[in-house]
Image (tube, rainbow, N blue to C red):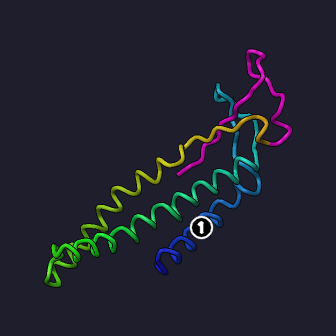
Amino acid sequence: MIPMLATAAANVSNIAFTRMDEVRSGAVLTDAEGTERGKSKTAGFLAVAQSACTRAVIVPCACLLLPPAAEAVAARFKVLPTGNVGLILFRLGFIYISLQGALPAALAVFPQTIELGAKDVEPQFQGLKDSRGQPIDTFYCNKGL
């Protein structure tokens, strides 16, 4: 658990410092037609938080907790390889399988495009109208990966 917690903390710090500008100045909001409507700090914070959750919690959990669990199950059923080379290959194989399965699954947890209701963002985005004169009820923001 300690390596997983350390990895999660490092990932959250990395994402927070790397994408601090999105939190401070906001992320670009668009309407359904793709027209940029401005920057929203609410959308920026949500985008960074979802990315941090994906990269700092879901991926490390799968990659750092599944291989030891698989090794414990294999040892219990006495199918764990006995030699050093076999054990290393078993561990590396499970780490590889975890990475290949966890990364796409983690990225799929939160869609890349965030949908935000007009009532959920700053007041300057409420009451805007699209090119047809219809009120904009939903804004979109690219969360990033």
Q: Amino acid at mark 1?
A: Val
Q: Position of residue 145 (x, y in %)?
A: 52, 52
Q: Quadrant of residue 114?
A: top right
- Give the left or right position of residue 72, taking residue 140 as reference: left
Classified by dominant secondary structure, the portion drawn in magenta counts as: loop
- Element under label 1? helix
- Residue lying at 70% horizontally and 47% vertically, measured from the top left: 43
Q: Residue furthest bottom?
A: 84
- Give the magenta range: 122-145
Q: Residue furthest top?
A: 132
Q: Is residue 41 above or below residue 125?
A: below
- Residue lying at 52% horizontally and 75% vertically, measured from the top left: 5
- Residue lying at 49% horizontally and 81% vertically, measured from the top left: 2
Q: Is residue 7 above or below residue 15?
A: below
Q: Residue furthest front?
A: 76
Q: Is residue 62 above or below residue 139?
A: below
Residue with the mark numbered 1: 12
- Residue lying at 60% horizontally and 63% vertically, measured from the top left: 15
Judge whether residue 135 is colored magenta.
Answer: yes
| Most foreground residue, 138 or 36 | 138
Q: Position of residue 24 (x, y in %)?
A: 76, 57
- Give the left or right position of residue 33, taking residue 71 as reference: right
Q: Quadrant of residue 36?
A: top right
The local crowd at label 1, few if under 14, some if 14 to 19, many if 20 or more residues have their Cα within 10 Å, is many
Q: Position of residue 87 (x, y in %)?
A: 20, 79
Q: Is residue 3 above or below residue 35?
A: below
| Most foreground residue, 79 or 125 | 79
